[in-house]
Image (cartoon, rainbow, N blue to C red):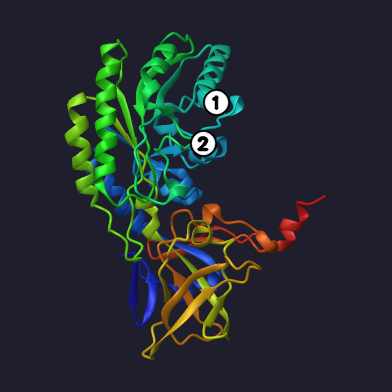
């Protein structure tokens, strides 16, 4: 079902967003359980469990209910912090389905992950390798690893979400990979099992993926020729979604999976895939209420009660999110800028959008906000932390309550 119009109102899985508003107040995030399950199901179809492990990228949406929903479908978790590891475990995702990525793992985080028995550490530097070896030896354990290799491939996406170029902070340079693997093989607390690669986010072209997969295959052959037992290939994530922004549309998941299979299946490795945005992005909206409509010098401002603290992507990445009225009207469309209440010029969601005439109290939905929305939300200007709602089986429920300013102030001493 997802987000559809019934009786001139936007619904989530059959539940009116106007009704959800009466439970949550505004602003709030609302997720479609049906859409999340459908999107993840496509990954399971294209990367079957006997050959692959699909690890949801927790950084995209770390709510416990979302993680539990995915874990029940067989999802693993790709985590990038000790906190995300704790979230995944508490949501019921087994440690044997968890991959730990990230450039700054601490010794304490490594120790906890080792104690839990996670599937794999994606090691991003030689200093991290040495630290992990020491922690593992102190525990009498052997840490299963793959090195994240930086292939210096331009993903053709926004500079702030490109991760596979030589100038990015991620991974081991491809030109040094064999040397680093040789060193790792000599460390008693390390068990080399794979190679990892992730070149960026919101990719809409298969060619960068093809280059990355080819690089993985070539490196696998090279490392095996030196005696390394490479059994796992972590291809990362990054498949984009349609933001209706006029940009190139992403390839289908089927074509993405077919490309991976053509290049990697002959190697006989277990494939790890780490989707995030393509699972939850289209499954969420940010619902907000119009506070004022202000006539400026040649521009009309629709001022809503959601701000850049609630959804950072437009101000952080100049990202476009489609905005629609929750209740359809038959009136003419007018051009306006949709802005928030934060005392920053950057608190602008979209400029020059055509919307029906809106009045104070009307609701709008900021679409495709299920990924990198609530997880990046903050409390700038001492604003309440935005709540999250999940619609499942025809009912809406609170999965993160609003944290009010009084509670935030109470943290101070």
| Residue 157 disc label | none
Toward the bottom, the furthest residue is 331
- Checking the image for residue 110, the label placed there is 1
Kindly check if marks 2 and 1 are in contact, taking CB atoms under 8 A apart as contact: no
Identified at 24% across, 44% down, the residue is 207
Can you say whether 175 is above or below 33 in the image? above
Q: Is residue 391 visible?
A: no
Question: Residue placed at 42% from the left, 34% from the top?
Answer: 166
- Residue drawn 42% across and 77% down? 353
Q: Position of residue 156 (x, y in %)?
A: 34, 48
Check the image and report above or below for 62 versus 307: above
Residue 174 position (above or below residue 79): above
Q: Is residue 260 left or right of residue 33?
A: left
Which one is nearer the viewer's eye here, 52 or 145? 145
Looking at the image, which residue is at 42% across and 38% down? 77
Q: Residues within 10 Å of mark 1 (few under 14, many from 20)?
A: many
**Total numbered labels:** 2
- In the rendered view, would you say 61 is above or below 171? below
- Residue 292 in the image: state x and y as whole percent: 59, 83
Spot occupied by residue 35 in the image (x, y as percentages of width and height): 34, 58
Neighbours of disc 2 within 10 Å: few (<14), some (14-19), many (20+): many
- Residue 85's disc number: 2
> Which residue of the protein is positioned furthest toward the right in this rendering?
413
Between the C-alphas of marks 2 and 1, the distance is: 10 Å
Q: Position of residue 144 (x, y in %)?
A: 42, 20
* SS of the residue under disc 2: helix
Residue 154 placement: quadrant: top left
The image quarter containing residue 135 is top right
């Amino acid at each position: 079902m997802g987000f559809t119009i019934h009786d001139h109102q936007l619904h989530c899985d059959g539940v009116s967003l106007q009704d959800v508003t009466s439970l949550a107040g505004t602003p709030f995030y609302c997720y479609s359980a049906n859409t999340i399950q459908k999107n993840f199901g496509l990954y399971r179809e294209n990367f079957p469990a006997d050959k692959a492990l699909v690890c949801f990228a927790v950084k995209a949406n770390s709510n416990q209910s979302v993680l539990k929903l995915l874990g029940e479908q067989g999802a693993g978790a790709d985590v990038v912090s000790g906190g995300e590891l704790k979230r995944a475990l508490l949501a019921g995702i087994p440690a044997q389905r968890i991959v730990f990525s990230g450039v700054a793992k601490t010794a304490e985080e490594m120790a906890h992950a080792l104690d839990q028995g996670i599937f794999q550490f994606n090691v991003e530097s030689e200093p991290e390798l040495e630290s992990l070896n020491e922690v593992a030896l102190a525990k009498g354990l052997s840490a299963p690893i793959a090195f994240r290799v930086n292939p210096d491939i331009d993903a053709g996406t926004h500079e702030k979400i490109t991760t596979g170029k030589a100038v990015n902070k991620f991974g081991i340079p491809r030109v040094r990979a064999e040397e680093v693997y040789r060193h790792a093989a000599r460390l008693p607390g390390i068990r080399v099992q794979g190679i990892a690669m992730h070149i960026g986010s919101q990719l809409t072209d298969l060619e960068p993926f093809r280059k990355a997969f080819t690089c993985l295959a070539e490196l696998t052959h090279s490392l095996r020729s030196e005696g390394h037992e490479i059994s796992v290939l972590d291809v990362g994530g990054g498949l984009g979604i349609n933001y209706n922004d006029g940009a190139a549309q992403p390839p289908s998941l089927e074509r993405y999976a077919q490309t991976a299979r053509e290049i990697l299946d002959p190697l006989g490795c277990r494939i790890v895939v780490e989707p995030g945005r393509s699972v939850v992005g289209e499954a969420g909206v940010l619902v907000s209420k119009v506070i004022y409509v202000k006539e400026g010098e040649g521009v009309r401002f629709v001022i809503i009660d959601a701000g850049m603290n609630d959804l950072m992507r437009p101000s952080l990445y100049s990202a476009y999110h489609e905005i629609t009225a929750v209740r359809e009207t038959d009136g003419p469309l007018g051009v306006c800028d949709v802005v928030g209440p934060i005392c920053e010029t950057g608190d602008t969601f979209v400029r020059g959008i055509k919307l029906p005439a809106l009045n104070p109290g009307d609701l709008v939905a900021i679409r495709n906000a299920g990924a990198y929305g609530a997880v990046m939300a903050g409390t700038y200007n001492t604003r309440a932390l935005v709540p999250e709602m999940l619609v499942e089986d025809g009912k809406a429920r609170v999965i993160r309550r609003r944290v009010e300013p009084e509670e935030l102030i109470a943290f101070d001493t």
